């Protein structure tokens, strides 16, 4: 089981395309706070997106 | 407007098809004479007309399912229709398609105040929902201008908006459940009287799907308590840029008005001539801002909003002192479209959305395009959410003016996307903006959307020729990721 730490969407796309091509299952994990809930499943790789945590923009007049 | 090539085989079988339809629904629910079908040959995008193969008006959901199932087996296309008020050609018929009208589904089935919802058939008009509950102090918030005529089923198909959607959300935010019929004739229920449901948000997928994924046969709508009071401000500006700035400043101050509408010079004058609402004729831009809620809150917000608009450079401010005055402020805006109809033989009503802060830039761009095309444009906006309705004035009797108006409109929509906005605010894509979809979406985006379509309707029988500019066969879409080589079927029709 490999862990891919993703820092941007481009890296995420590459990892997903590779996994699709190889028929491998991906677990996507942010902060992992709900990981223990629900059905137990097994995966081939972990996609760690927890690092994608910055605020990119703030426009109060656009309500976003 | 290029539409899919009609299937002559289906057209040749018209009589036999109508005979079978008359076995699936009561005989009088099938309309097949040319004269009678004329009433269904267009929707609100009236420049485009086409007689359908036949019109079917089912009375029960079982009849809808039977018709769809049979058409699916026979490979016959279906164009669903609510009230036919779409402004983007969503209900434009095809010569080889059955026009499936939901007009007979006109009953409110249940009013449930405990769960704050109304269960209704899709052919009920939007305003009828409010009328059914207003005596008890409730209403249905999404209020498109066509609300006395448009159907709630159509509202789901288009994810309709309206003046009060700034504060209360669109159809999707006020929809709790639907029943729908798939192209294979299966009846599905999504959502219900509860709040969240688990699993995928298929209701979100269906809302705004413009008749391409299924036919809505019942809706459960959220109703709200009528606010204690509402007051409005009528604000004039000498510069449209200042009006745009005021809009952004109000939102940035944390105030979400119940409605915030803007009109520019030409629209103001036309509306004032028609409605005599007391609009400042010399103003370059007019804002109508409505605040609703408890009286104490409304009075406090009115003061804050007045201060903000004066700081932004308002040249005139009037605050409504009575319900009559508030309605008078709105009278001009509500009659803006017919009012503009008096100053021009024809007009094209466009619909696009931009980030609010780009309003001044868009006004300048439109003024310059107006010069370039030699056609006047009157502007009416849902300024609060950046949704523009430029009305391009022309005369259809002058050769080439319709085409010039359409090009002008396409340039406006291109500008919307350029400025970080989108092709449609609330009228939908339909046929009107189908061929502009590539301006906003990449090929990957469009293919992904089409895969969703293929999951519901792989045979492309539901409302073909709408929304997507290029037809992709479903089989090839499914294999795109794995086969990195050339695509099969390279010569698919493009329209």
Image (tube, coloured by chain):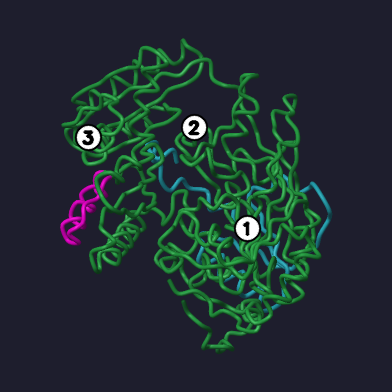
Chain colours: A cyan, B green
Q: Residue furthest right?
A: A39
Q: Element at badge 2?
A: helix
Q: Element at badge 3?
A: helix
- Region in magenta: B360-378
Residue B49: x, y in percent? 47, 65
- Residue under mark 1: which chain is it in? A
Mark 3 and mark 1 in contact? Answer it, CB < 8 Å. no
Relative to B147, say whether B447 is above or below: below
Label 3 environment density (alpha carbons within 10 Å; few <14, some 14–19, many ≥20) = many
Tell me which residue sits at (69%, 48%) in the image.
Answer: B104
Q: Element at badge 1?
A: strand
- Residue under mark 3: which chain is it in? B
Label 2 environment density (alpha carbons within 10 Å; few <14, some 14–19, many ≥20) = some
Residue B328, by quadrant, is top left
Quick one: quadrant of the N terminus of chain B? bottom left
- Residue under mark 2: which chain is it in? B
In the rendered structure, the answer to whether residue B204 lies left or right of residue B232 reads: right
Tell me which residue sits at (69%, 53%) in the image.
Answer: B202
In the rendered structure, the answer to whether residue B431 lies left or right of residue B57 reads: left
Q: Is residue B394 visible?
A: yes
Residue B372 in magenta stretch = yes
Q: Circle 1 sits on which residue?
A: A48
Tell me which residue sits at (55%, 89%) in the image.
Answer: B486
Residue B223: x, y in percent? 64, 30
Q: Please tell me which residue lies in front, B375 or B342.
A: B342
Relative to B183, say whether B389 is above or below: above
Q: Which label number is shown at residue B242?
A: 3
From mark 2 to mark 3, how far is it between C-alphas?
23 Å
Q: Please tell me which residue lies in front, B384 or B342.
A: B342
Tell me which residue sits at (39%, 51%) in the image.
Answer: B351
Q: Circle 2 sits on which residue?
A: B167
Q: Earlier in the sequence, mark 2 or mark 3?
A: 2
């Amino acid at each position: 089981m490999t862990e891919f730490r993703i820092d941007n969407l481009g890296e995420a796309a590459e990892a997903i395309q590779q996994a699709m091509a190889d028929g491998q299952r991906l677990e996507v994990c942010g902060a992992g706070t709900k990981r223990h809930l629900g059905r137990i499943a097994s995966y081939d790789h972990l996609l760690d997106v927890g690092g994608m945590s910055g605020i990119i923009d703030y426009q109060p007049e656009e309500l976003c | 407007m290029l539409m899919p090539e009609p299937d002559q085989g289906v057209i040749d079988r018209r009589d036999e098809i109508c005979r079978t339809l008359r076995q699936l629904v009561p005989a009088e629910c099938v309309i097949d004479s040319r004269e009678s079908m004329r009433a269904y040959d267009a929707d609100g995008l009236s420049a485009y007309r086409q007689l359908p193969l036949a019109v079917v008006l089912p009375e029960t959901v079982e009849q809808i399912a039977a018709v769809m199932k049979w058409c699916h087996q026979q490979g016959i296309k279906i164009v669903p229709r609510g009230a036919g008020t779409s402004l983007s050609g969503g209900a434009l018929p095809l010569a080889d398609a059955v026009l499936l009208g939901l007009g007979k589904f006109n009953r409110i089935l249940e009013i449930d105040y405990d769960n704050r919802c109304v269960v209704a058939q899709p052919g009920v008009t939007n305003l009828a929902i409010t009328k059914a509950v207003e005596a008890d102090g409730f209403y249905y918030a999404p209020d498109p201008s066509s609300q006395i005529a448009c159907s709630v089923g159509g509202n789901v198909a288009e994810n309709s908006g309206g003046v009060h959607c700034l504060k209360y959300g669109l159809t999707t935010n006020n929809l709790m459940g639907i029943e729908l019929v798939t192209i294979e004739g299966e009846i599905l229920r999504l959502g219900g009287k509860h709040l969240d449901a688990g699993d995928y948000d298929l209701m979100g997928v269906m809302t705004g799907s413009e008749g391409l994924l299924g036919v809505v046969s019942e809706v459960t709508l959220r109703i709200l308590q009528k606010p204690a009071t509402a007051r409005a401000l009528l604000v004039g500006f000498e510069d449209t840029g200042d009006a745009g700035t005021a809009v952004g400043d109000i939102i940035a101050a944390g105030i979400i008005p119940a409605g915030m509408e803007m009109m520019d010079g030409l629209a103001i004058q036309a509306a004032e001539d028609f409605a005599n609402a007391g609009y400042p004729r010399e103003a370059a831009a007019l804002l109508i801002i409505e605040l609703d809620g408890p009286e104490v809150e409304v009075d406090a917000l009115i003061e804050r909003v007045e201060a903000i608009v004066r700081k932004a450079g308002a040249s005139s401010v009037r605050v409504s002192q009575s319900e009559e005055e508030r309605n008078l402020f709105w009278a001009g805006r509500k009659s803006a479209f017919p009012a503009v109809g008096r100053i021009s033989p024809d007009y094209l009503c466009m619909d696009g959305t931009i980030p609010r802060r780009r309003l001044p830039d868009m006004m300048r761009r439109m003024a310059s395009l107006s010069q370039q095309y030699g056609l006047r444009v009157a502007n009416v906006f849902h300024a609060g959410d950046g949704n523009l309705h430029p009305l391009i004035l022309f005369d259809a009797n002058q050769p080439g003016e319709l085409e010039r108006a359409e090009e002008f409109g396409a340039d406006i929509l291109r500008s919307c996307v350029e400025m970080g906005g989108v092709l449609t605010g609330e009228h939908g894509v339909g046929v009107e903006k189908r061929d502009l979809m590539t301006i906003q979406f990449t090929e990957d985006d469009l293919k992904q959307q089409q895969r969703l379509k293929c999951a519901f309707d792989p045979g492309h029988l539901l409302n073909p020729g709408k929304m997507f500019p290029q037809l992709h066969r479903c089989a090839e879409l499914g294999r795109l990721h794995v086969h990195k080589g050339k695509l099969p079927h390279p010569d698919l029709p493009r329209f």
